[in-house]
Image: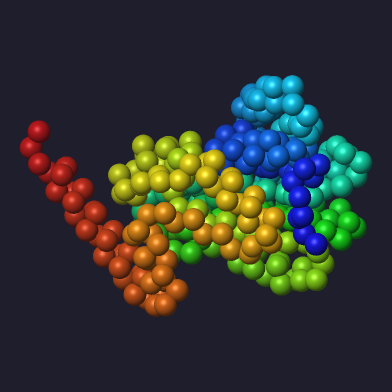
């Protein structure tokens, strides 16, 4: 038994100040969960918590707790899970690791500090959440994790090598952990969305013409789909509404070398187009 119902469940959501994290917290609270919002952004976090409470409109819903947390700091994540466990009599039912960052650009100019930040937040943040929540879930004999990866965790995306590395790491971690926890009553759903209309993606689009981003998913769509997937103990939730991404995912499954070639060729064509446009007279 992993996650059987949302009502009265205690759910921790990291990255809850905005984007997918906030949308997920809202869905959970609407369905009667006690929600613990965690984020490093204190002002955004408090605003998010207030929004959830205001949206209740006097209806009977679960508790809301906001805990400022840097997921790269193990002690802070441990404190977060302790507060979550104490929220409603000592249980912890769901942990959603949606805290994450994106960094892009050709590898030639990619800074080591950016690579380290990607790994610290996207990978170690997920690891810390598991380590801190697992003792309670083991004691209960039930619980569920939702890990946010990305289609970049399944594809070789040029100019996103560092981001891909972090999201492939989440994919590998979740698969190995799922096998390790087999029979424990603790489930893991790993989510691989295509571009989602979030502040992170908007910033990436503003910073780089190389990525040619089309955000066809909303945070609300992703949140609803992944909560349903968790209730069904679905292991893999891949959300790729655009035809090109769906096609390259299929090619990647059948012939990874071909997928790398296709993506590399498309990237070089994009570079050529950009160079040509910069050389045109004003």
Q: Residue at x 21, y 48 (%)?
A: 274
For this orientation, the residue located farthest to the front is 59
Residue 144: give x, y in percent of width and height.
74, 56
Above or below, comparing residue 227 to residue 263 in the picture: above
Name the one closer to the observer, 224 or 176. Answer: 224
The mark tally for this picture is 0
Residue 84: give x, y in percent of width and height.
82, 40
Q: Residue at x 40, y 62 (%)?
A: 246
Q: Identify the image's colour scheme: rainbow, by chain, secondary structure or one colour.
A: rainbow
Relative placement, left or right, of 144 versus 255 is right
Residue 17: give x, y in percent of width and height.
61, 33
Q: Residue at x 74, y 22 (%)?
A: 58
Quarter of the image where one finds residue 269? bottom left
Any part of residue 221 in sight: yes
For this orientation, the residue located farthest to the left is 281
Name the one closer to the observer, 32 or 121. Answer: 32
Quarter of the image where one finds residue 170? bottom right
Q: Which of the image's four quarters has the N terminus?
A: bottom right
Above or below, comparing residue 266 to residue 71 in the picture: below
Name the one closer to the observer, 213 or 62. Answer: 62
Q: Residue at x 67, y 55 (%)?
A: 230
Residue 117: give x, y in percent of width and height.
56, 47
Any part of residue 131 in sight: no
Q: Which of the image's four quarters has the C terminus?
A: top left
Relative placement, left or right, of 211 versus 175 is left
């Amino acid at each position: 038994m992993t996650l059987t119902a949302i009502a009265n469940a205690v759910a921790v959501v990291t990255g809850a100040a905005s984007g997918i994290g906030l949308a997920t917290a809202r869905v959970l609270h609407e369905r009667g969960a006690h929600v613990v919002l965690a984020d490093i952004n204190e002002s955004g976090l408090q605003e998010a918590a207030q929004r959830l409470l205001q949206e209740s409109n006097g209806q009977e819903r679960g508790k809301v707790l906001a805990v400022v947390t840097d997921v790269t700091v193990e002690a802070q994540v441990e404190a977060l899970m302790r507060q979550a466990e104490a929220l409603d009599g000592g249980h912890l039912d769901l942990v959603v690791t949606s805290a994450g960052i994106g960094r892009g650009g050709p590898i030639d100019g990619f800074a080591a500090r950016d690579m380290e930040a990607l790994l610290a937040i996207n990978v170690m943040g997920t690891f810390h959440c598991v380590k801190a929540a697992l003792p309670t879930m083991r004691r209960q004999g039930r619980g569920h994790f939702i890990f946010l990866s990305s289609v970049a965790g399944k594809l070789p995306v040029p100019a996103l090598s560092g981001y891909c590395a972090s999201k492939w790491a989440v994919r590998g971690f979740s698969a190995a952990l799922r096998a390790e926890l087999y029979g424990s009553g603790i489930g893991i759903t790993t989510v691989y969305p295509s571009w989602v209309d979030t502040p992170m993606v908007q910033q990436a689009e503003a910073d780089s013409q190389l990525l040619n981003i089309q955000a066809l998913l909303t945070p609300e769509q992703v949140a609803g789909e992944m909560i349903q997937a968790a209730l069904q103990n679905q292991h893999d939730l891949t959300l790729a509404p655009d035809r090109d991404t769906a096609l390259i995912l299929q090619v990647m499954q059948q012939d990874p070398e071909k997928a790398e070639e296709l993506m590399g060729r498309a990237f070089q064509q994009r570079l050529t187009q950009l160079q040509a446009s910069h050389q045109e007279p004003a």
